Image: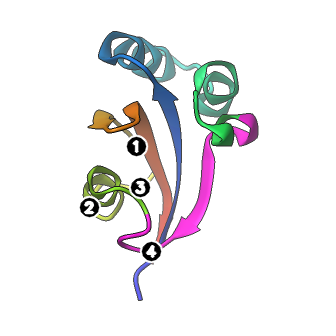
């Protein structure tokens, strides 16, 4: 079965999400920004979501996590929870 490992940053609005993405693209550390800004409890661990399979996260996550290139920040991705930046760190 396919599985992946990813990390994310969850914020309330798209503008904040885009700002954080620009900071990461400018060299800011993803994990540091997750600890500082993410509304998800995973933010305390740098946004790490661990390993999971298809269907274990919301559909919008699955679509990105199981198709995006590894180690490239994706987003903003809108879900029922808010706006996310996602980075797939492993997939098999």
Give the alpha-carbon distance from disc 2 to disc 3, as whole Å.
Answer: 9 Å
Mark identifier at residue 72: 1
Marks 1 & 3, CB-CB < 8 Å contact:
yes
Residue at x-position 44% and y-position 68%: 56
| Residue 88 vertical placement versus 79 (above, below) | below
Residue at x-position 70% and y-position 27%: 35
Q: How would you rate the neighbour count of disc 1 (Cα within 10 Å): few for under 14, some for 14-19, many for 20 or more?
A: few
Marks 2 & 4, CB-CB < 8 Å contact:
no
Residue at x-position 40% and y-position 81%: 2
Q: Nearer the viewer, mark 4 or mark 3?
A: 4
Which residue is identified by label 3? 70
Residues rendered magenta in the picture: 44-56
- Percent of width and height locating residue 34: 62, 29
Which residue is identified by label 4? 53
The kind of secondary structure element at disc 4 is loop
| Residue 56 vertical placement versus 40 (above, below) | below
Q: Nearer the viewer, mark 2 or mark 4?
A: 4
Question: Which comes sooner in the sequence, label 4 or label 1?
Answer: 4
- Percent of width and height locating residue 75: 31, 34
Which residue is identified by label 2? 67
Q: Quadrant of the N terminus?
A: bottom left
Give the alpha-carbon distance from disc 4 to disc 3, as whole Å.
Answer: 16 Å
- Percent of width and height locating residue 4: 47, 68
Mark identifier at residue 52: none
């Amino acid at each position: 079965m396919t599985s992946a490992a990813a990390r994310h940053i969850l914020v309330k609005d798209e503008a904040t999400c885009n700002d954080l993405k620009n900071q990461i693209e400018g060299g800011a550390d993803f994990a540091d920004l997750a600890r500082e800004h993410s509304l998800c409890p995973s933010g305390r661990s740098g946004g790490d979501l661990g390993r999971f399979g298809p269907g274990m996260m919301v559909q919008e996550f699955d679509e990105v996590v199981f198709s995006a290139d590894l180690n490239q920040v994706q987003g903003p991705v809108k879900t029922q929870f808010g706006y996310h930046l996602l980075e797939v760190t492993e997939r098999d």
